[in-house]
Image (spheres, rainbow, N blue to C red):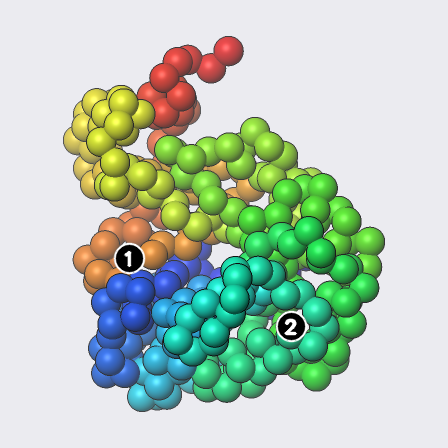
């Protein structure tokens, strides 16, 4: 179970705030953090790799400039992915979950984010060489030193989590989940979160709706248009509302850095789809009614 759970229902994903997107300067980061707090978003999702291992430091500069108290926000970060970047040359993309690397990565994240602790640390992706004992040693030390409050994973299957839990409890799993990419409802991931009282998070919660024009998206567009009028909501709000209605109480990690869309995302928390409308959208995604 998550300790001190004050995570906002909508989480701001920071991947596109830096070099992989908007390229915000500290002043712009500061302004966007303040805007998020004004509309009720207090949780910020990071990963050490974002921006080629640079975005956390840029965010930290903006956070320091904002003057916002650390206790008024929650920071999530991930570690484990190694790839070739200017800031960190590697010969091949790989995963490193040695005790030494986990500890060093968290220390870098804390320094970059200008904070003493992470509210939640996630292992970014599963590795075939992951050793639960190594993870236990790292997590135990980080908790004892007060550098992380909660520990979880991202993109892990239930069986991979079960293997990891032979040594260390896993309190959260961040997976891909959207109307266009909803396999998490069928591969046991969301059921595992409900069964074991894990915090479920969704990355890319809007899926491919605004990126593709394939048959799936066209079917969803056809069904979502009348619902936009019915609920007086935008398409992205309905896509988020669809996720929020799942009993796993999924927390969408919204990747936009645009203020109006962040505000719309928060508005989605006030929408409750009628049962048949929820299934109309699911059927549109799958191209057929449920069995």
Identify the residue under disc 1: 256
Mark 2 vs mark 1, foreground winner is 2
Image coordinates of residue 7 in percent, x first then y, are 49, 62
* Residue bearing the label numbered 2: 102
Q: Residue at x 58, y 76 (%)?
A: 105
Q: Name the secondary structure under disc 1.
A: loop
Residue at 42% from the left image edge and 71% from the top image edge: 85
157 lies left or right of 23: right
Residue 38 in sight here: no
Q: Is residue 129 visible?
A: yes
| In the image: residue 39, left or right of residue 197 | left
Q: Residues within 10 Å of mark 2 (few under 14, many from 20)?
A: many
Nearer to us in this view, 28 or 35:
28
107 relative to 237, above or below: below
In the image: residue 37, left or right of residue 176: left
Residue 230: which quarter of the image?
A: top left
Q: Quadrant of residue 247?
A: top right
Q: Position of residue 51 (x, y in %)?
A: 37, 69
**In the structure shown, which secondary structural element does the residue marked by tag 2 occupy?**
helix
Q: Position of residue 52 (x, y in %)?
A: 40, 70
Q: CA distance from mark 2 to mark 1?
A: 28 Å
Quadrant where the N terminus is found in the figure: bottom right
């Amino acid at each position: 179970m998550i300790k001190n759970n004050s995570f906002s229902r909508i989480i701001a994903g920071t991947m596109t705030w830096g070099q992989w997107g908007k390229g915000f300067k500290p002043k712009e980061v500061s302004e966007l953090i303040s805007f998020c707090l004004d509309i009720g978003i207090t949780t910020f999702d990071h990963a050490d790799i974002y921006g080629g291992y640079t975005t956390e430091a840029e965010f930290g500069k903006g956070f320091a400039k904002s003057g916002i108290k650390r206790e008024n926000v929650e920071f999530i970060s991930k570690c484990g992915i190694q790839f070739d970047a200017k800031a960190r040359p590697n010969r091949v993309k790989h995963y490193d979950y040695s005790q030494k690397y986990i500890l060093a990565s968290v220390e870098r994240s804390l320094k970059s984010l200008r904070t003493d602790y992470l509210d939640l640390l996630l292992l970014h992706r599963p590795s075939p060489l992951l050793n639960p004992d190594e993870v236990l040693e790292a997590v135990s030390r980080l908790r004892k030193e007060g550098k992380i409050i909660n520990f979880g994973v991202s993109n892990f299957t239930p069986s991979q989590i079960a293997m990891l839990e032979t040594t260390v409890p896993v309190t959260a799993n961040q997976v891909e989940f959207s109307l266009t990419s909803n396999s998490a409802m069928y591969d046991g991931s969301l059921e595992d979160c409900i069964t074991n009282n894990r915090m479920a998070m969704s990355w890319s919660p809007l899926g491919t709706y605004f990126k593709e024009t394939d048959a799936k998206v066209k079917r969803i567009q056809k069904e979502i248009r009348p619902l936009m009028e019915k609920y007086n909501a935008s398409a992205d709000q309905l896509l988020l509302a669809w996720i929020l209605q799942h009993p796993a109480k999924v927390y969408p990690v919204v990747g936009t850095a645009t203020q109006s869309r962040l505000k719309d995302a928060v508005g989605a928390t006030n929408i409750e789809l009628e049962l048949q409308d929820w299934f109309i959208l699911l059927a549109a995604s799958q191209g057929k009614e449920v069995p």
